[in-house]
Image (cartoon, rainbow, N blue to C red):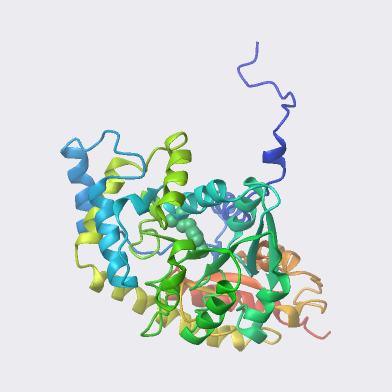
């Protein structure tokens, strides 16, 4: 008998079949295979800071292991950690969040997942501005809700306006997802823009999920925060945030949701039957991060990102047919590549979509970019600049070469 598992079809659930795999993770997987085969790939696909976790946080992780802080914690995290998050939220929003209004999750991703599961029913509509972060759509579908996508473009700096929201609002509208700074565009809503959105939100019963995971990766002094603009809507706002991006802690898996107690309790109920809580070691490290002054570590990281952002935006705009806005936050650029579609490139290839373009540049010059289709925005692509300036320069140089017109014979 063979020791490999027989290839027999297994019936998969309808729930699973309606979900698409994460495009960014698939591109990264292909890049991983190419690298393993010795190919010199430069990936602009990365969705995490290329900095180490700050030293005091790493030490707290080790301390947790050595002090046997390695057992179950309460569902939704230790009270000490939830209190520390509450203190941070108080500084940021001026509002008081008690531990029962916060649940700590395995990354912000789980916080969002639980929020959709706990608060959406079949037939509920979730308003998602595009370009959107890839998991929103799939998580909405997993909750049997219906995504209502609002396309945006460079014309509105990839932001939605109250009129755009009004046009899609129905009695079934249940949630509006706000993501500022945005993945994939890096755009940040201004105070005035948020005030407009709040006016719209006040005229209906929609819940607001404000995903603020990039709130500390900012290239401007102020961060207009939803709950500062609309504290009166705190009773139907779920704040989503976490450690992953700010403290370069993607692998520790610490995120949280904060909001009205009934909603958080419902989320924690589902959590209690699924993951219970993030690892106790990670929670201990997270507590250290929230109770230590890490501003200089964060500032060093953001300064490096700023330098790379300035370079990459200028360099991309020098490529014929490419147009790139200057992001105010996160570590992504989202250039418009429509000017290079439909015309012969370097080796005569014609790409008609950015999905084809991403394949072409990966094959031809070993550069990984994520096609805009994955973010609901054909014609664009996402490039992360969470890699060294040298690699960025090399990668953009290769991209420029691949996108150049064929040599005349
Ligand atoms: N929200 C946005 C907009 C993101 O870009 C990400 C990660 O890329 C997440 C949430 C999830 O973050 P985490 O790694 O904490 O689960």
- The C terminus appears in which quarter of the rendering? bottom right
The vertical placement of 82 against 183, above or below, is above
- The N terminus appears in which quarter of the rendering? top right
**Residue 125 is at least partly visible in this image:** yes
* Callout count: 0
**Residue 237 is at least partly visible in this image:** no
Residue 378 falls in image quadrant? bottom right
Residue 397 falls in image quadrant? bottom right
Of residues 216 and 344, which is closer to you in this image?
216
> Measuring 32% from the left and 65% from the top, which residue is drawn there?
89
Q: Position of residue 150 (x, y in %)?
A: 69, 71
> Measuring 67% from the left and 81% from the top, which residue is drawn there?
163
Of residues 87 and 222, which is closer to you in this image?
87
Of residues 374 and 3, which is closer to you in this image?
374
The vertical placement of 276 against 153, above or below, is above
> Measuring 42% from the left and 43% from the top, which residue is drawn there?
268
Instruction: From the viewer's perspective, tell me whether residue 338 is left or right of residue 126.
Output: right
The vertical placement of 111 against 160, above or below, is above
Instruction: From the viewer's perspective, tell me whether residue 167 is left or right of residue 390.
Output: right
The vertical placement of 308 against 99, above or below, is below
Q: Position of residue 54 (x, y in %)?
A: 26, 61
Instruction: From the viewer's perspective, tell me whether residue 62 is left or right of residue 335.
Output: left
Q: Position of residue 71 (x, y in %)?
A: 27, 33
Q: Position of residue 69 (x, y in %)?
A: 21, 38
């Amino acid at each position: 008998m063979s020791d490999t598992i027989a290839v027999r079809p297994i019936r998969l659930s309808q729930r699973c079949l309606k979900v698409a795999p994460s495009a960014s993770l698939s591109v990264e997987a292909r890049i991983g295979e190419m690298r393993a085969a010795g190919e010199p790939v430069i990936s602009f696909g990365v969705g995490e800071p290329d900095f180490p976790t700050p030293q005091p946080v790493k030490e707290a992780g080790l301390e947790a292991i050595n002090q046997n802080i390695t057992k179950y914690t309460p569902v939704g995290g230790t009270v000490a950690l939830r209190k520390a998050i509450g203190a941070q939220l108080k500084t940021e929003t001026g509002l008081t969040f008690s531990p029962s209004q916060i649940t700590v999750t395995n990354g912000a991703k789980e916080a969002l997942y639980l929020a959709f599961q706990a608060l959406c029913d079949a037939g509920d509509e979730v308003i998602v501005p595009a370009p959107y972060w890839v998991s929103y759509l799939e998580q909405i579908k997993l909750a049997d809700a219906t995504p209502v996508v609002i396309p945006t473009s460079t014309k509105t700096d990839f932001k939605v306006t109250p009129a755009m929201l009004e046009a899609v609002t129905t009695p079934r509208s249940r949630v509006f997802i706000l993501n500022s700074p945005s993945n994939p565009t890096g755009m940040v809503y201004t105070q005035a823009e948020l005030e407009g959105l709040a006016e719209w939100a006040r005229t209906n019963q929609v819940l607001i999920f404000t995903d603020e995971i990039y709130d500390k990766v900012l290239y401007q002094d102020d961060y207009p925060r939803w709950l500062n603009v609309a504290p009166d809507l705190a009773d139907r706002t779920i704040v989503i945030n976490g450690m992953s991006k700010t403290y370069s802690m993607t692998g520790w898996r610490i995120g949280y949701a904060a909001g009205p107690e009934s909603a958080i309790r419902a989320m924690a109920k589902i959590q209690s039957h699924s993951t219970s809580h993030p690892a106790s070691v990670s929670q201990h490290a997270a507590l250290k991060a929230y109770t230590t002054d890490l501003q200089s570590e964060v500032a060093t990281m953001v300064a490096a990102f700023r330098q790379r952002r300035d370079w990459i935006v200028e360099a991309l705009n020098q490529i014929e047919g490419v147009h790139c806005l200057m992001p105010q936050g996160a570590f992504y650029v989202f250039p418009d590549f429509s000017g290079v579609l439909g015309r012969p490139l370097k080796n005569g290839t014609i790409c008609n979509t950015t999905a084809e373009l991403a394949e072409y540049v990966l094959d031809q010059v070993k550069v990984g970019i994520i096609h805009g289709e994955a973010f609901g925005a054909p014609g664009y692509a996402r490039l992360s600049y969470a890699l060294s300036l040298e690699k960025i320069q090399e990668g953009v140089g290769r991209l420029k070469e691949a996108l150049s017109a064929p040599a005349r014979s």
